Amino acid sequence: MKKIKGPQRGYYMDNYTIQSLFSFDISPYVEVFEFEKGDFIIQEGNKPEYLFYMVEGKAKLYVTHKNGKISLINFLTPPIFMGEIELLNEERYSKSIQTSSKSICIAIAIEQCKEKLLADAHFLRYLCVFLSNKSTVHSAKYTKHQAYPLENKLAEFILLSSHQNIYKEKHTEISDYFGVSYRHLLHTFAQLSEAGVIEKMNMGYKILDKQKLQALADEIK
Amino acid sequence: MKKIKGPQRGYYMDNYTIQSLFSFDISPYVEVFEFEKGDFIIQEGNKPEYLFYMVEGKAKLYVTHKNGKISLINFLTPPIFMGEIELLNEERYSKSIQTSSKSICIAIAIEQCKEKLLADAHFLRYLCVFLSNKSTVHSAKYTKHQAYPLENKLAEFILLSSHQNIYKEKHTEISDYFGVSYRHLLHTFAQLSEAGVIEKMNMGYKILDKQKLQALADEIK
DNA sequence: ATAATAATAGGAGATATCTCATGTTTTTAA
DNA sequence: TTAAAAACATGAGATATCTCCTATTATTAT
């Protein structure tokens, strides 16, 4: 992780119109961080010092269970707040966020401007909408997840994450994401392959029958 | 559902210090509703006209899937906002809320004071904290749900919802809540009974071995 | 370049959970 | 008060998903 200063900093601040989220001058409280792939932006058990606003990159939100299982709760993509829960509620810093590619975050030092932030209707309104969307999306995802077998959810996911009919995500990551075993994910891929819906290639899978895949995905609300 | 007026209205308004959530005079926009058991406060597919704040009673949040399955997403207990998503985001009214006992809700007419609400830092801050808590709780619940078998989750739930070592929730409701079949819920109750942890009685179950139950619950993070 | 680590792959058998079917009991509504 | 609807119960067999095991590639770090 490194701090970005000088003209580079200005570029990110301006390009992503950070100031527009606030009704007071935020620049004294803001830093711009660049995280390398694999860096932790927030670590389980540590109180974050900043409210982060990711503007470039990609990250993953994890939680570790007592039984050692790790759940990949979500993929995080910009623009997104991180650490906002900790800004609002004391003593809640229970998840890890790890980048999966180089990422740029605007970081707002919590201690220095917590009170200002929490009194700024403009910012709070934006945050409310953000939280409410997050809640809606999460709720939809988890409701789906408990009501349908992996085959359907995977079909939907393949359609969403493939480019030019090629799917090439990492199995280890995706099995975490769906909360199923690696083994079972492979089973399900094999199943789709046998059904002639996809075909395994060197580096990934090719979609052979988009309609069938869509039909499987459509069984989900 | 009936509208409560006169001194009764004043009682609820004062007793639950509704005004303290806002920095402007909210009383012109507020009504007090009483819902009978089984009434729908919000219906799937209908845009709610009010932002509700439940102060007494108990309700259930549902969603209906394409395949006909119903998920009981959560039990709602006061104090809680309902319809806040719809206040913040247009075009999102996708869930039903049904009371499971007589309930009292403070209702704020959205159309009339949406703009005032969304400019009130005091209210927005409260709402942010509310949304953030909601998000944390949901996330914890669903993460658990996908990582542990019903036996553990049920053990935890029995401990939480029993009074004087007696558990007496409705199976139909609880199977929805956990997103498992009714059949499987009974299986799991039978399993706990066989293990001597609980014992079936006339109207419910008696906890025989609280320690074992706790041990099962403790396997969950 | 080499060794260590992570990701892929699949077999075999166990377990959790589901669907369907059927009968009884309790609650609700006409 | 009686009929209808909802909740309770349980058997049997199917399916989804898990754990454990064992190899074979890729990646990454020394």
Image (cartoon, coloured by chain):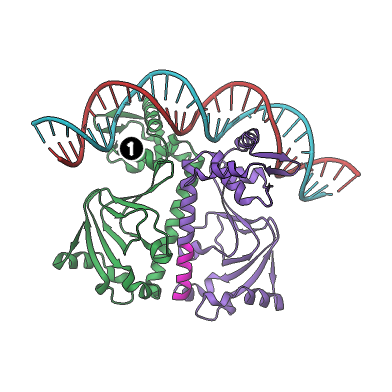
Chain colours: A purple, B green, C red, D cyan
Q: Position of residue B43 (x, y in %)?
A: 33, 54
Q: Chain of mark 1?
A: B
Q: Was residue B221 drawn as part of the magenta stretch in this picture?
A: no
Figure check: A64 above or below A20 = above
Residue at disc 1, secondary structure: helix
Return the residue at label 1. Answer: B172
Horizontal relation, residue A96 to residue B66: left or right: right
How many marks the image carries: the answer is 1
Q: Residue at x 74, y 41 (%)?
A: A201
Q: Position of residue C9 (x, y in %)?
A: 70, 34
Answer with the quarter of the image where residue B188 lies.
top left
Figure check: B65 above or below D22 = below
Answer with the quarter of the image where residue B111 lies.
bottom left
Quadrant where the N terminus of chain B sits is bottom left
The answer to whether residue A16 shows anywhere in this view is yes
Q: Was residue A121 drawn as part of the magenta stretch in this picture?
A: yes
Horizontal relation, residue B169 to residue A22: left or right: left
Figure check: B144 above or below B112 = above
| Numbered range of the magenta stretch | A120-131
Q: Position of residue A47 (x, y in %)?
A: 54, 61
Question: In the depicted view, which residue is nearer to us: A167 or B82?
Answer: A167
| Dominant SS type (magenta) | helix
Figure check: A22 above or below A207 = below
Callout 1 amino acid: Thr
Q: Residue at x 38, y 73 (%)?
A: B122
Q: Position of residue B20 (x, y in %)?
A: 30, 71
Question: In the depicted view, which residue is nearer to us: B220 or B44?
Answer: B44
